[in-house]
Amino acid sequence: LFLDDMQWADSTALDVIHTILSDTMGSSCMFFVGTYRDNEVQIDHDLFDLIERLEISNVRTTKVYLAGLDQEALNTMISDALCLYPRICKSLSDILFQKTKGNPFFVLEFMQSLKSRGLLQYNIHQKRWVWNEDIIRAEDITDNVLHLLSSKMNGLSGDVQTLLKVMACFGSSTNESVIGYLSESAEYAGVRNGLEGALSDGFIVKDEEGCLQFVHDKVREAAYNLIPDSDKKQFHYHLGKVLYALCDGKDVGDTIFLIASQINHGKEWILGDKDLSIAIAELNMKAGKKALDGCDHKTAYSYLGAALSLLPNDHWKSHYDLSLRLNFLMSNAANSCCQYDEAEQILRRGLANARCLYDQLPSYLLLSQ
């Protein structure tokens, strides 16, 4: 079993991994490989707790630290790419190593940038690739691969840029069906064409199940930077509202999490519309319940908390049924997240506001457990 990008895994997923790997009663024929970016995790990340617990459980582990290519390996790669002897391209590979620290992805982006700007070109008369070392060495922007990617993206068509922005808002990956939903709207009608362009340009890859994913974290970061910082919150919110309008009343499966997470960026605008506040509270409640059903308690806690925050001050009077359901679900989520005091407080609030014994029974049952 191989899992990539484990720096994004939550504690629930890591608990499942620990349970599988430390199960002495089950099969011992399990070989697990997990990767993470050590520059994207802090010392208190749940991933390190997993490693420690595996060692305590006597699960044999091996840690491999993957660094960038060294100068010799990078020179070999450049030699193969340009079909030149290593001694001929060593001066170029030394510059690339200085600029990219041997990161293969950065090297390829750098070389593509040099080629597109004519700083690396094929000479027909010499029948080989040629370059100007002094000009390349003086390049400033190569120290920042984000600048290279952003410059490249700024030259793309509007449809491709829109697709990249949308994908970046969703995270590192999403399903093609979501793009299909968006293409039905007037605002995002061109995202289907944009997807084809992004795939052909190599920014995104698609697997057999229709999962779309950025080829690298830096590509996603550069795509997200296409949205001005001052517009990011509004972009997320508008994207969520469009998806919500398109999918309202449909069974969209896990896409409900994506819709809720996007539209929740606009809480300040949602609260200004009472009817919308209730609608989005119900959306978050559905997402929270779905997460609870899937034993993703932390995610459920987050969505249900968002739902409660959208209710008016008199919600026990004006929206009794919704308040009752939300209150009980939230207490369940808090209890499952080991927030026992909060869970009890929420339950007692529900008991105090319930209108009859029948409505109080679920809370009494949970309190007794």
Image (cartoon, grey):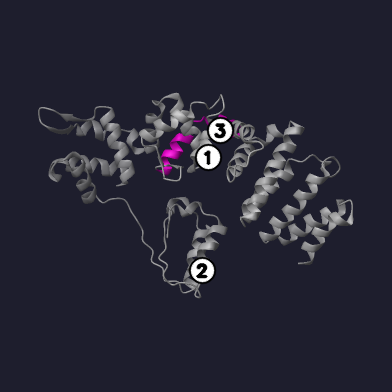
Percent of width and height locating residue 280? 70, 38
Q: How many marks?
A: 3
The stretch in magenta equals 216-237
Residue position marked by numbered label 3 in the rendering: 232
286 left or right of 76? Answer: right
In the picture, the quarter occupied by the C terminus is bottom right
* Residue type, numbered disc 1: Phe
Q: Quadrant of residue 130?
A: top left
Percent of width and height locating residue 228? 52, 29
Task: Indicate which label's residue lies in the foreground, 3 or 1.
Answer: 1
Instruction: Name the residue rendered at 28%, 50% in the picture.
Output: 69
Percent of width and height locating residue 329? 73, 53
Cα–Cα gap, marks 3 and 2: 39 Å
Residue at the limit of the structure toward the right, as seen here: 356
Above-or-below relation of 221 to 1:
above
Residue 352 within the magenta-colored segment of the rendering: no
115 left or right of 141? Answer: left
The kind of secondary structure the magenta stretch mainly shows is helix
Q: Earlier in the sequence, mark 3 or mark 2?
A: 2
Q: Quadrant of residue 307?
A: top right
The disc label shown at residue 53, or none: 2
Q: Earlier in the sequence, mark 3 or mark 1?
A: 1
Residue position marked by numbered label 1 in the rendering: 170
In the picture, the quarter occupied by the N terminus is bottom left
Q: Is residue 44 visible?
A: no
Residue 234 within the magenta-colored segment of the rendering: yes
Q: Are marks 3 and 1 in contact (CB under 8 Å)?
A: no
* Residue type, numbered disc 3: Lys
Q: Secondary structure at mark 3?
A: helix
Q: Nearer the viewer, residue 166 or 88?
A: 166
Percent of width and height locating residue 96? 26, 41
336 left or right of 214? Answer: right
